[in-house]
Image: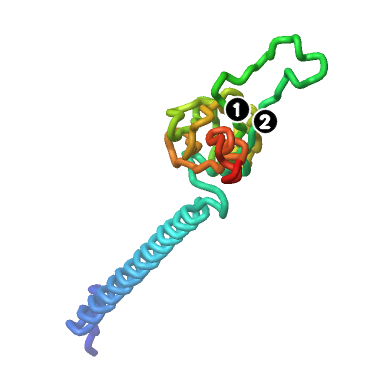
Amino acid sequence: MSTMTRSTQPPRLRAGERVGERTETTSAAKRRVVVVTAAIAVAAAMLLAGLWGLSADRSGDEQAGTAPAGWVDVPGGWLTVREVSDRAVDHKAMPGMQTMPDPDPVPKGYVRLTVDLSLAARDETLRWKPADFAVEGKGVGVVRPHRAQLGDGVVPADTQVAGGLTFDVPKNAHNLTLQFRDGTLIPLALPDQHHRSSNPSAGQSPSS
């Protein structure tokens, strides 16, 4: 009888089997690279989309910052002038005031004009002071407000205040403009009585 000997060594793999394992390993690695690359591409696309959206939003904000109809852009907000009038009070014409001194007289040769306006803040609180405003023109130079009735100098964002600024300007001044913080010049349409006072012959008939 012959005795069969059982080997304790594991069988050797064929060359084809080893190549197959390496191929599977390589394929798995490639799949991982593809998945990672795809994830990076998606993330990059989302980032670009977010940046584009932010840019579009900012562009929209810039469009929204355009002054509404009838308003003009000024540093920090918008401004509109509604009317220019002469509201100087003749105290001597008031009963009982004939013998009393005028507490706030208009200088001789001047006219006291009130500019009715509205000032709006755009994106942030707008703070102002009377010296931020000025009237300029021919025969006047630069004039700061004699009196300001336009709130307390603080305009919260996205709100507006309305009021008036009073200026003493020479009677012969013309081509007046309102300026805010050395910004845009806003032409002022003067009241008829100012034109008559600066040109005494205005309004008279040729035969007079």
Secondary element under disc 1, as helix, strand or loop, is strand
Secondary element under disc 2, as helix, strand or loop, is loop
Residue type, label 1: Arg
Image coords of residue 3 (percent x, y):
23, 84
- Label 2 close to label 1 by CB (< 8 Å): yes
Image coords of residue 100 (percent x, y):
74, 10
The Cα atoms of the two marked residues, 2 and 1, are separated by 7 Å
Is residue 74 visible in the rendered image? The answer is yes
Q: Which residue is mark 1?
A: 112
The residue located at (50%, 43%) in the rendering is 187
Residue 147 vs residue 205, the one in the foreground: 205
Residue type, label 2: Arg
The residue located at (69%, 14%) in the rendering is 102
Quarter of the image with the C terminus in it: top right
In the picture shown, does residue 52 fall above or below 176?
below
* Relative horizontal placement of residue 26, taking residue 55 as reference (left or right): left
Other residues around mark 1 within 10 Å, as few (<14) / some (14–19) / many (≥20): many
Residue 165 vs residue 171, the one in the foreground: 171
* Relative horizontal placement of residue 21, taking residue 84 as reference (left or right): left
Point out the residue furthest to the left here: 15
Q: Which residue is mark 2?
A: 87
Other residues around mark 2 within 10 Å, as few (<14) / some (14–19) / many (≥20): few
Image coords of residue 58 (percent x, y):
45, 54
In the picture shown, does residue 7 fall above or below 112?
below
The residue located at (60%, 45%) in the rendering is 205
Counting residues from the start of the chain, the first of labels 2 and 1 encountered is: 2
Image coords of residue 180 (percent x, y):
49, 35
The residue located at (23%, 73%) in the rendering is 9
